[in-house]
Image (tube, rainbow, N blue to C red):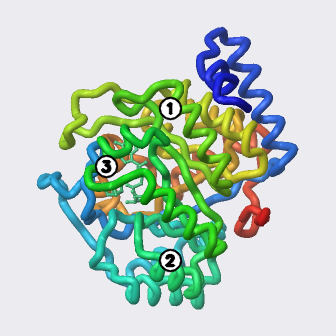
Amino acid sequence: MSRDEIIRLLILDTPADIEGLFKAADRVRKECVGNDIFLRGIIEFSNYCRNNCLYCGLRRDNLLAQRYRMEDDEILDLAKAIQARACSTVVLQSGEDPHYTGDRMRRIIGKIKDETGLAITLSIGQRPYEDYKAFREAGADRYLLRHETANPNLYANLCPGRTLGERTQCLEWLNDLDYEVGMGCMVGLPGQTAEDLADDVLLIKELGADMIGIGPFIPHGQTPLNDRKPGNALLVLKMLAIIRLVTRDTNIPSTTALGVLDDQCRKKAFEAGANIFMPVFTPGDYARRYDIYPGKGNVKKADGAILDFKGFFDSIGRPIGEGPGGRRRHK
Ligand code: SAM
Ligand code: SF4
């Protein structure tokens, strides 16, 4: 798809055309990754962050954030709970927290692998190549590092002290180390245009992402973007559908942020290209403090969320998949 074709799909406005886009994405999803929906259990183990992304409630300068760090054993126990709930993948997520040194992360990953055999996905931000390599050797299988926006100027404005080039360099290292790699962006960032979103799709295609997370930007009251408008849920769904059409056999979650903005849309995403559901296993008091955007801490916890969605998945004829549901590598 060319940039212009992607833009034409993004601005579709009649209900029939939009439904046509979703149906096409749903067909490609069925043909390329089948009907199964795979669960990925998330543990948000630290909300400390050395970064200062303008959009995020965990940013370093948010002095009102109540910070926490989990002990290694707490993380391991949660991974065991995930294993007991028919999720074959654990996602370890945090702010960029140097307190978890390369060695410490390596030990945590090794223990989880040895004691649970779960597929391990990391989402802990930018690290040196040596760390990524050590994590891979210790048993990490996948890495989520959203590129956030493919517009380099917008990226530099939103992530002070960082560049899009550094971000894509990390993605290339992860690819070289044979991780399954997750990219993704926010929709509705202040100043973002339809052209920027089309460039997001093209960058995801160019770098060959295996997993793609797309969510709306949701303004957080304790950040410099507190008075901006949130992203549009329908536009998120269109992006998700287009990315399914373009990338075909990738793993695409229906994201928590989409559910916070519009609960129905989180379900609708599964009929517009999504095939991954990510229940949150972070315990209540920590989850409340993992306050990336408003509403995030109130998201239903894993058991309730799985129960809620299971009925919906049954109603659309989509079984919960067994096994880790990784993507076959194409390199
Ligand atoms: N610190 C790691 C990183 O940035 O890659 C992982 C955790 S970070 C909180 C996970 C994702 O949250 C980011 O990639 C970003 O896309 C998303 N996020 C942050 N602030 C957001 C906001 N206000 N609205 C929606 N999504 C947001
Ligand atoms: Fe830190 Fe990630 Fe939030 Fe940026 S998006 S401030 S790196 S937690």
Q: What residue lies at 66% left-to-right and 49% top-to-bottom?
A: 206
Mark 3 residue element: loop
Q: Is residue 224 left or right of residue 260?
A: left
Label located before the other in sequence (2 or 3): 2
**Amino acid, disc 3:** Cys
Query: Visible in this render: residue 85?
Result: no
Q: Does residue 310 lie above or below 89 as drawn? A: above
Query: Visible in this render: residue 228?
Result: yes
Q: What residue lies at 33% left-to-right and 55% top-to-bottom?
A: 162
Q: Which residue is mark 3?
A: 159
Residues 298 and 43: in front is 43
User: Whole-percent x and y of residue 13?
Assistant: 62, 11
Label located before the other in sequence (1 or 2): 2
Q: In the displayed image of the protein, which residue is found farthest to the top?
A: 14
**Amino acid, disc 1:** Asp
Q: Which residue is mark 1?
A: 196
**Amino acid, disc 2:** Tyr
User: Quarter of the image containing the N terminus?
Assistant: top right
User: Quarter of the image containing the C terminus?
Assistant: bottom right
Q: Estimate the spatial distance between the alpha carbons at disc 2 and disc 3, rounded to whole Å.
A: 21 Å
Q: What residue lies at 50% left-to-right and 62% top-to-bottom?
A: 169
Mark 3 closeness class: few <14, some 14–19, many ≥20 residues within 10 Å: some
Q: Does residue 134 lie above or below 13 as drawn? A: below
Q: What residue lies at 28% left-to-right and 61% top-to-bottom?
A: 285
Mark 1 closeness class: few <14, some 14–19, many ≥20 residues within 10 Å: some
Label located before the other in sequence (1 or 3): 3
Q: Is residue 218 left or right of residue 48?
A: right
Q: Which residue is mark 2?
A: 132
Ligand 2 within 8 Å of disc 3? The answer is yes
